[in-house]
Amino acid sequence: MKVIVIGALGMLGRDVMEASEGAGNKTLGFDLPELDITNYPDMRSALPEADRIVNCAAYTRVDDAETERDVAFAVNSEGARNLARLSLRRMVPVIHLSTDYVFDGHTKRAYDEKDRVNPLNIYGTSKLAGEKALRAGGGPYLIVRTQSLFGKHGPNFVRAIARKLRESNDPLRVVDDQVSAPTYTRHLADALIRLMEAGSEGIVHVTASGSCSWYEFACAIVERLKPGHEVVPIPSSAMKRPAMRPMYSLLNNARYRSLTGHVLPTWQEGLDAYLKEESNFE
Ligand SMILES: NC(=O)c1ccc[n+]([C@@H]2O[C@H](COP(=O)([O-])OP(=O)(O)OC[C@H]3O[C@@H](n4cnc5c(N)ncnc54)[C@H](OP(=O)(O)O)[C@@H]3O)[C@@H](O)[C@H]2O)c1
C-alpha cells in the first residue's frame, strides 16, 4: 500500500511512519511547515495519490487551547474537514486520530464508540468537531479514539516524571482521581497498521489494556527508575489547570478486538517497552 502520514514529525506520527514502513508500505510523511492541513488548496496540491492517509496532525496543547480556541479549531476541526474533502474527492480512506476527551468521564464504565459525547474542554470540543466533519464528509474514514499517549518522540508524562526524579528528591504530587489507560505510541502505531490492513471504517477505541490513575502510573515509573522515592496522591482540585479533564475516561476496546482479533499490551508492558527504548533520559 502507499500510505501518507500527516503530522509525521509528532510523537505518534513518527512511530506510525516507522510501523508503516516496517509493514512494507511505501510511506510518505508530511508536517508543518511544508504541509498545513488548514489550507485546503495547498494540501490538495502537496499530497500525492495514496491508498491511505493517516492523520496524526493536531493541536494537542490541552490547557493552551482554552485561550487559543481559534487555532485549536482551525487545526482540529477545519483541518479534519479539509481531509474529509480530499477523502471524498479521491475516495481515499482517512485514518484520523481522536481522543477520550470527547467524553465527560462521568460514567463509571469504559466508554463504547456509540456512547454520548460531551467534551469538558476546548481541545475536546475541537476534536469532536473534527470527528463530525469526517463523518459528514461523505468519504471513507476511520476515527481512532485513544488516550494518555507516551512515546519516544514527544513530551509525555513518563519523561516529565523521570526529569523530576533526576532533578530533585522532593516528593512527587500526582492526581489520583483521574483514571485512564496510558498507551505507548509504538503499540498504538502497530494497532493502526492492523486496522488499515483490515480495511476498518467508522469509529474505534484503541488503548492499552488495563487502567490506572495518574498516581498509580507515577508509582509504577518511580518503582522502575528510582525505587523508594515518595509519591503523594492529590485530588485534581488541588491542581489549578485551565482545562477540565474527564475523571474516568476508559475506552472499551471490544470493537478493535473484533475487527483485528488483537488486544494491545497492558500499560505496564507499554511502560517497560518505552523505558527500554528510552534507556537514556538525558
Ligand atoms: N498525546 C496524547 O496523549 C493524545 C491522547 C489522545 C489522542 N491524541 C491524538 O493523537 C494524535 C497524535 O497526537 P500526538 O501527541 O502525537 O501529537 P503531537 O506530538 O502534538 O504531533 C502533532 C503533529 O501535528 C503537527 N501539526 C500541527 N498543526 C498542523 C497543521 N496545521 N498542519 C500539519 N501538521 C500540523 C505538529 O506540528 P508542530 O509541532 O510544529 O505544531 C506535530 O508535528 C492527535 O490527533 C491527538 O489529538 C493524543
Image: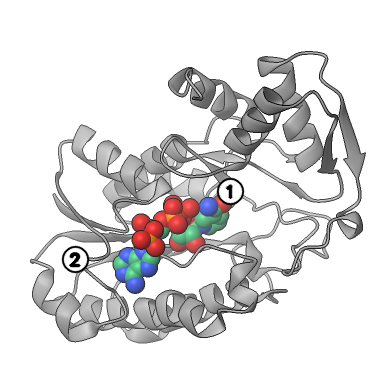
At a point 91% along the width and 51% down the height, the residue shown is 235
Using the image, tell me which numbered label, if any, was put on residue 254. 1
Q: Position of residue 282 (x, y in %)?
A: 49, 25
Using the image, tell me which numbered label, if any, was put on residue 34. 2
Q: Is mark 2 within 8 Å of ligand 1?
A: no
At a point 61% along the width and 48% down the height, the residue shown is 148
Mark 1 against mark 2, which lies toward the viewer?
A: 2
The 10 Å Cα crowd at callout 1, few under 14, some 14 to 19, many 20 or more, is some
Above or below for 56 versus 220? below
Q: Is residue 96 found left or right of 43 in the rendered image? A: right
Q: Position of residue 173 (x, y in %)?
A: 84, 39
Q: Is residue 150 found left or right of 91 in the rendered image? A: right
In whole angstroms, how far apart are the C-alphas of marks 1 and 2? 38 Å
- The answer to whether residue 52 shows anywhere in this view is yes
Q: Position of residue 126 (x, y in %)?
A: 54, 78
Q: Secondary structure at mark 1?
A: helix
